[in-house]
Image: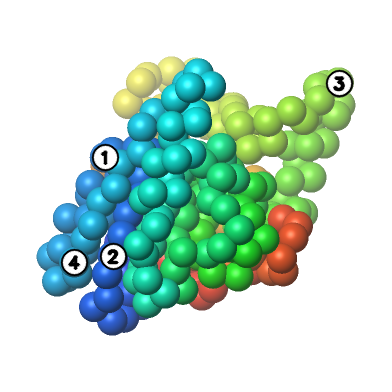
Amino acid sequence: MLFQQLQVALIGIDKYFATQAGFFQVRAGHDAAAALANAARRLKFEVINRQLPERGDSTRDSVAGLELRKALRDIKSDDRLVLWLRPDDIAALGARAAAAQIYVSGLMSKLEDAPIPPAWRRYILMTYPFDPPDLRRVRMNFPHGWLHTQGLLVTADRIQSNTYIACMIVADVIDDMLDSFVQDFLVERLEVMSGSRFSTGYFPRVSLASGQRFASKGGYIVKFDGAAGTHVARDGAWIVP
């Protein structure tokens, strides 16, 4: 999914990075940030990468906080800032936003529950490879209803709903196969039938075909609505890699 999210970010470069200002990446990860930097350089952007130390014990956490503030110190208001950060680092961003356009990884930062400081929220654009909560609410009745009837608590909503949907697709396919339990036939029926599901949970749609192994392709760029809360609004249409 992080690779899919990266592709959404790459496709959005022309729209969101319209001028050749500085392009800063502050990261706690490696592969996705490196791929985005390479793509940006091909489009003639100047890219400056700043790597944070890994978090762990309290000593390293303190160092990471200092390094984060240092990494943001000389960023100007017209620079583009891309943050590949986990929630602990997001929460430590400080009381003043470091740039006018700031992009964060939704999957890394905990989506709409990302602990973004109030001063940063109006400037944040987030990669979001799902439907926002207000668009998926009705679809979530299916996995939530099943979990309730089984006496199971919702403790990890996205993981539980994705697991439910995957199991339901496989169950429908096995019913359709009758007694022809052959591996290649199973894969073929999965590719054909996955797109006919009404309940797709977090995703606006799912589909597979020969050679495709991502059932959901694309995502939104979203922004936060207000200085507090978890409501996000789409900043454009669904972007497909």
SS of the residue at dot 2? Answer: strand
Q: Position of residue 237 (x, y in %)?
A: 50, 73
Confirm whether residue 16 shows in the render: no
Q: Nearer the viewer, residue 90 or 174?
A: 90
Structural crowding at the residue carrying mark 2, measured as other residues with C-alpha within 10 Å and reported as few (<14), some (14–19) or many (≥20): many
Q: Nearer the viewer, residue 43 or 153?
A: 43
Work out whether mark 3 precedes mark 1 in sequence or the reverse, and give the earlier one.
1
- Quarter of the image where one finds residue 38: bottom left
Q: Rounded to the nearest whole Å, what is the CA distance between mark 3 and mark 1?
A: 40 Å
Q: Which mark is residue 31?
A: 1
SS of the residue at dot 3? Answer: loop
Q: Position of residue 75 (x, y in %)?
A: 36, 64
Q: Which mark is residue 46?
A: 4
Residue under circle 2? 23
Structural crowding at the residue carrying mark 3, measured as other residues with C-alpha within 10 Å and reported as few (<14), some (14–19) or many (≥20): few
Q: Rounded to the nearest whole Å, what is the CA distance between mark 4 and mark 3?
A: 54 Å
> Is the N terminus in the top left, top right, bottom left or bottom right quadrant?
top left
Residue under circle 3? 151
For badge 4, the amino acid type reads: Glu
Residue depicted at x 67% and y 61%: 118
For badge 3, the amino acid type reads: Gly
Work out whether mark 4 precedes mark 3 in sequence or the reverse, and give the earlier one.
4
Q: Rounded to the nearest whole Å, what is the CA distance between mark 4 and mark 2?
A: 6 Å
Q: Name the side, left or right, on which 233 lies relative to 61.
A: right
